[in-house]
Amino acid sequence: KHFVRPDAWARALAREWMATMYSRRRYSILPSKVEISEDKQEARKEYIRLRQCVRETFESFLRNLNLKSLHALEVQFELNGGELNSCNFLRVFEKVFPAPVIEKPGWTASYDERRFIQQTACLTLFEFVDVDQSGGASWME
């Protein structure tokens, strides 16, 4: 369970935004823009809700990974010489990542929020796979 102190919500949002902006430069993929309320309590709730959806999407990908998806990913790695740079990694994995399932009462995620959730989940996977922090991932990683 993640808890963000009310006085730390701005720092957490700033880190999230910087990570997204960094990913745009590093991965050449335009990040989705997510509007966050200016009210601190509401912004805290929105941030926690988005992070929970990212975690659920990431876990859903891992649970539902099957041979067909693995074979498609392996083919993409082979087509790129056995290694995908960060930009290609995200483009390939976005296709096999599940669409975020939003099952929160009273909240309907916009297209940009769903895209942000999916991109952030893909970035989470990339961080785990890119163990040597080279900006790319091989099939063996």
Image (cartoon, grey):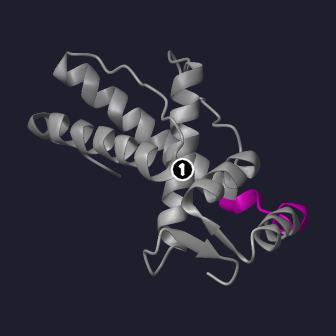
Is residue 133 shown to the viewer in this render?
A: yes
Residue 86 vs 44, above or below: the answer is below
What's drawn in magenta, residue-wise?
Answer: 62-70
Determine the image quadrant of residue 141.
bottom right
Total tally of numbered discs in the picture: 1
Residue 115 in the figure: left or right of residue 9? right
Name which residue lies at 34% across and 33% down: 47
For disc 1, the marked residue is: 121
Q: Residue at x 84, y 64 (%)?
A: 66
Please indicate whether residue 26 sits to the left or right of residue 75 in the image: left
Residue 50 % position (x, y): 43, 35
Classify mark 1: residues with Cα within 10 Å, few (<14), some (14-19) or many (20+). many
Q: Image height check: is 63 above or below 51?
A: below
Vertical placement of 99 versus 96: above or below? above
| Residue 20 falls within the magenta-colored stretch | no
> What residue sits 53% from the left and 63% below the top?
126
